[in-house]
Structure formats: structure tokens, C-alpha cells
Amino acid sequence: MGFLDNSGDIILDAVLTDAGRARLAAGDGTFKIVKYAFADDEIDYAKWDGDNTNGTPYYDIEILKTPVLEAFTNNTSLMKSKLISIARNNLLYLPVVQINETDGEPLNGSSTQAANSFAVLVDETTDDVFEALSSDNTKGVFYATKNTTKYIQLDQGLDTTEISKQQALAPALVETHFIIEMDNRLGVLSSPGNVAQPFSFLDDDNIAAYNIANVNDVQGFFASINGDTVGSPIAGPRGTAFRFKIKPSLELQTSTYLFTKLGTSGNTWNGASGTYSYIDSIVKVTGATTGYSINVPIRYVKQD
């Protein structure tokens, strides 16, 4: 791995993903390029200098001189900020995605509990201990075996006070499809009604991707908040709310191996007796329309 030579011409460096390389190597005719993406993770557009006294050729000189890494194939390490194309040229703001802790379950902010994450309990034994705790001590907690009405909610829209939140978000900016990625060894995507979902793709790093589209959404993943004026962290026009849960994997439910390998043990949970093992992870949620992504922190919890 090295840096691209950016001393002269603009260079486009393209590589196949690990999945693409595997299909090419198979030689069975299944290899076909059907999707691609562009990214410029290293670029800081704040370096644009419209006041440079040397004239317009120098406005972007600092951007063009930014060192850019060669493309490499590991999808977990690169392309965190994908480029998108939007026909409109009069946009001052682009949508973001934020955790809604009012309409959805709030994060557990206690440093002696989930440390500003959502907690996913992994087995019935742990469930039984937490079920006896007060609501203050189970904030942001999702059970392994007990169905509740709790869910994680992500709101999408323009986070600015310069445009009224009563104004509808332009249809071209409303998310109708989300891609959810998580470590398949640890968790499984679930609907708000506690129905586990099959993943759409599993890569060589054991990262499962779920494609959830707002088409005949009978499982309640999506809710329109377009025109809503209360209950959301989005300050301006709002588009879509995405609701989901995380279930523990079978391996976390039935074994301590991954907790030993990836986590920590002997932790205490304020209000609960005994000690607990933790694994901290994230669930990445990306809007397919705008490409905006958010990492949702998850702490998997098992009684020692």
C-alpha cells in the first residue's frame, strides 16, 4: 500500500473488492461488474481557498496536493465517504442521519453500564437478572429472549434551523432504502416486531449486509417523519425514520468463546448483582439515496 502520485494529472485508481476478486478467480462465468462506487476519504474540502490572491487556479491547490492512498480491496478499511451525484445544483444542505432518543430507545449513557451504547443481552440467564432492575438501570437495554416494544430509531433529514422543520424534505433526498452492516459473529438484524432478518450478503470479513427497502414494509422498519415538528433531533425538514433491533447471534447465546477472544470479563453493571462479560461493536447504517452513514454503538452483555 502506498500513496498515489498527485504531482500532475488527476488519477482514478480502481480495484476489485474481495468479493469481486473471488468471483474472478473462480473462473465460472459468475464474474460481472454490476456496481461501483467512488470515494475520496482523504480529502478535506475545507481547504478550498476562494480568497487566494494568486487567482482561481490556486483556490483548490491545497486539496489537489493532499496525499491520497492507493485503492485497496478490504471493504472495512476504505471508502468511508462515498461520492454521490445529485441533479440539483442549488442545494445548501444535505441530509444526515441521527439517533432519535425520544421516539426510540435512548442510549445508555452510564459509564458503569453501557457507556453511551445500546446494550444487547445475549441469553435468558442475563435477561432474568436485568428484568428485575429498575427502568433507570435498563435504559438502552434489549433482551435476548423477551419481546418488548423497544427499538432503535434513526431519523433522516436536514439538520439546520435555516430551513423550517415544517417544510417537506425534497423527494430526491428522502431515504427509502438503508444498508445495515454488522459483525455476523455477534448479532442479527431484527424488525421492531422481533423478527430476525436474513442477510443479503456476507463478506470474507464476516460482515453481514442487510438491504432493507421501503417497499411493502409490513415489518415496520420505516416511518415517515416528513413534516413532523416534534420528537426528532433533526432541526430542519425531515424525511424518514428507520427502526430496528439487534438480536444476539447463536454463538454469543451458547458460548463464551467470542467474549474471551474479543471482549472483557469481570465487569459490573450498576444495580445488577454478579459480573458480566462485554463485547463492544458497531452497527453501520447507510442511506442508499444520499450515502450518509452512521455508526450505532452496541455492547453485547453476558453474565459471567
Image (cartoon, grey):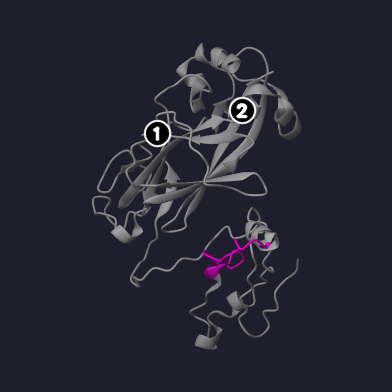
Kindly state the secondary structure of the residue where label 2 is placed: helix
203 to the left or right of 239: right
- Residue 175, above or below 13: above
Asked whether disc 1 touches disc 2, contact meaning CB atoms under 8 Å apart, the reply is no
Kindly state the secondary structure of the residue where label 1 is placed: loop
The residue under label 2 is: 250
The residue under label 1 is: 104
The disc placed on residue 134 is none
Give the residue at x 55% y 79%. 60
The percent position of residue 29, horizontal first and vertical second, equals 61, 63
Which quadrant of the rendered structure holds the C terminus?
Answer: top right
On the image, which quarter does residue 162 sit in?
bottom left
* Measured Cα–Cα span from mark 1 to mark 2: 26 Å
What segment is highlighted magenta in the picture? 27-46
Residue lying furthest front: 28
Q: Is residue 35 magenta?
A: yes
